[in-house]
Amino acid sequence: MTERPDYQLRRNAFGRLELTGADGETHEGVVPVRAFPISAPDDGLALVDPYGHELAWIDRLAELPQDLRMLLEAELAGREFMPVIKRIVGVASFATPSTWEVETDRGTTSFVLKGEEDIRRLTPPALLIADSHGIHFLIRDRHALDQHSRRILDRFL
């Protein structure tokens, strides 16, 4: 059975998260922040106030009661937009800046890669690609991509 935390979390009339601690003090504008957003997204989550002060720590999202977990997952989904690249359809050129057309878990899109330095290696075999607008695209396992996608990607690594 899941144990309830010693605080309450809810949305206020303006749609912002409010945390009421065991001491009865209410904090408005609470934001959930993942400690390891890519390597362990469900492990280690801080609830921080608008000034960045940690109000509560959650070891595992899965251990929370369902209502609280769903509230936090909805808040995180609204804040975190990181499409996962499933396939690289093509690139306009192999020189940067270059326009990439990709298939993601959220549909087909295109973006501009300013330079090779915008492709960051994470814990192997993951990659993080930042487009010219600052949107981050994730490749969880570059070796799991199809051969065409890997060949294009290798030209930029």
Image (cartoon, rainbow, N blue to C red):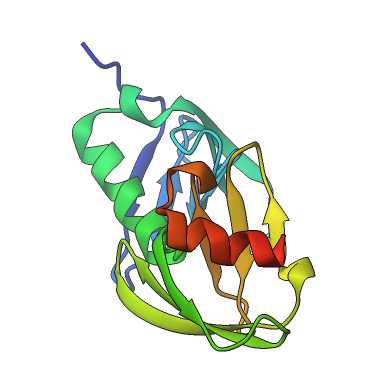
* Quadrant placement of the C terminus: bottom right
Pick the residue in front: 69 or 137: 137
* Label tally: 0
Residue 49 visible within the image? no
Left or right of 12 on screen, residue 28: right
Specify the quadrant of the image occupied by residue 8: top left
Left or right of 122 on screen, residue 140: left
Which residue is at 28% across, 39% downward?
68
Asked if 138 appears above or below 61 in the picture, the reply is: below
Furthest residue in direction right, as rendered: 117
Which residue is at 41% across, 73% downward?
102
Q: Position of residue 84 (x, y in %)?
A: 42, 58
Furthest residue in direction top, as rendered: 1
Q: Position of residue 62 (x, y in %)?
A: 32, 27
Q: Position of residue 112 (x, y in %)?
A: 59, 85
Pick the residue in front: 57 or 39: 39
Left or right of 43 on screen, residue 61: left
Asked if 105 appears above or below 101 in the picture, the reply is: above
Asked if 127 appears above or below 117 in the picture, the reply is: above
Which residue is at 45% across, 62% downward?
148
Residue 11 visible within the image? yes
Pick the residue in front: 78 or 106: 106
Specify the quadrant of the image occupied by residue 114: bottom right
* Quadrant placement of the N terminus: top left
Which residue is at 30% across, 67% downward?
106
Pick the residue in front: 109 or 150: 150
Q: Position of residue 18 (x, y in %)?
A: 41, 54
